[in-house]
Image: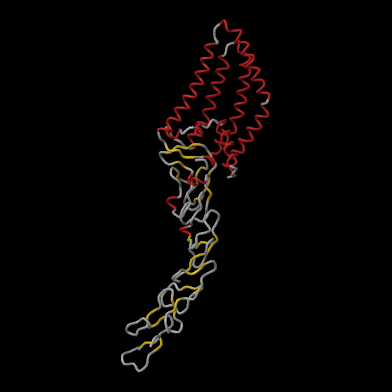
Amino acid sequence: MSGTFAPASGSAACTSCPPGTSSEESDDGACLACPKGKFSAKSDSCEVCPPGSFANGVGNAVCSPCPPNQFPKDDQTGCEVVTGYYNDGSEGQSVAVPVGVRRDVPGMTLNALDLEEGYWRTTSNSTEILRCISKKHCLGGANITIMCADGYTGPLCAVCESGYAVMGSGELLTCEQCTGTSIVKIIAWLIFVLVILAAAVLVSFLTSSKDRQQSIRSRSDSFAKALEKITKYTPVVKIILSYFQVTGTLGLVYGIRFPTIFSIITNIISGLFSLNLFVVMPLGCTMPAGHYASLLLYTIVPIVLTVILLGIRYALPEEYKNIRTKLFEVFLAMTFVILPGVSVKIFSTFACQKFDGDYGSYLKVD
């Protein structure tokens, strides 16, 4: 008889199977424990758990209801969290997914959180979901080993892999693969600078004869007047440049994100007037890159330009005295323009970001 068994050979009567067991599927009449996903309360037979409940062990007399925000698996051997929640590893606990985790994936666990594109975390056990500097740097997904796009690595996928060079800064930072094209870009920039310098030397040579001294004086006076007109608008230019330079550093210091077009403008102005050559050419393909390399350029290039500018001023002959006077004003304006970017670069050496667990601290700009 189903749900009973004979305790011994020759027994006059059968005995009911204990709860959680049944002899229904036994060949020799012995009571067998109900498998996972089933239960037996009256020992008649093992039945599938009712909707909304589960049995995750064998020999279940009753089924357990799923905790809040969870639903039973198809075989009712356990529960899965609903969309918008994940299992944090605690018994019966489900937690609402944080910002940066997909909300349309059911049954997520802490070790397999499915991140949205543009987000990153340190390890598979981390509950701190961080937004990447640029969306295209971080692939998202549940696989912690391939969270960064090709060419990117490190914290927030903001470091270039070996064989790649950094271009741009902030949200516009990209890692460009070092190829023959990269070297061509660097050479093209160097040729451009050399052509400008050669043109300046050629003009100076062609206008240096004595019979053109009067023309030189006239031209120098005109050039000085032009510089004077430019310097008349210096306060307005200073205010505009200072605005863009300061706002360009807010993203680095406070993590503020601006519209893309505004970020492009601030990055161009900041990079141009701070003399950050890493913004315009892939120097990392030919020399060590990183924060300390760019810090070296930030601090040395202004000094070199100052020496060149002052050298030109004092090397000019007497007939260029008007230009010599204005060049000093240009020098002062240059120091004003360059100072904010250089100062931010220097002080950013002390700006670190600490990550959870044993991941440690890293420079925000490196």
Colour mapping:
secondary structure
Direction left: furthest residue: 9
Direction bottom: furthest residue: 12
Q: Is residue 291 above or below residue 70?
A: above
Residue 168 image position (x, y, % from top left)? 51, 37
Residue 256 image position (x, y, % from top left)? 60, 44
Q: Is residue 195 above or below residue 277?
A: above
- Quadrant where the N terminus lies? bottom left
Q: Camera-side residue: 201 or 275?
A: 201
Residue 129 image position (x, y, % from top left)? 52, 53
Residue 120 lies left or right of residue 32; in this view the side is right
Q: Residue at x 61, y 23 (%)?
A: 330
Q: Residue 333 occupies which quadrant of the picture?
A: top right
Q: Camera-side residue: 68 or 308?
A: 68
Q: Residue at x 51, y 14 (%)?
A: 202
Q: Residue 315 occupies which quadrant of the picture?
A: top right
Q: Looking at the image, how many numbered discs can be counted on the residues? A: 0
Residue 93 image position (x, y, % from top left)? 52, 66
Residue 88 lies left or right of residue 247; in this view the side is left
Direction top: furthest residue: 211
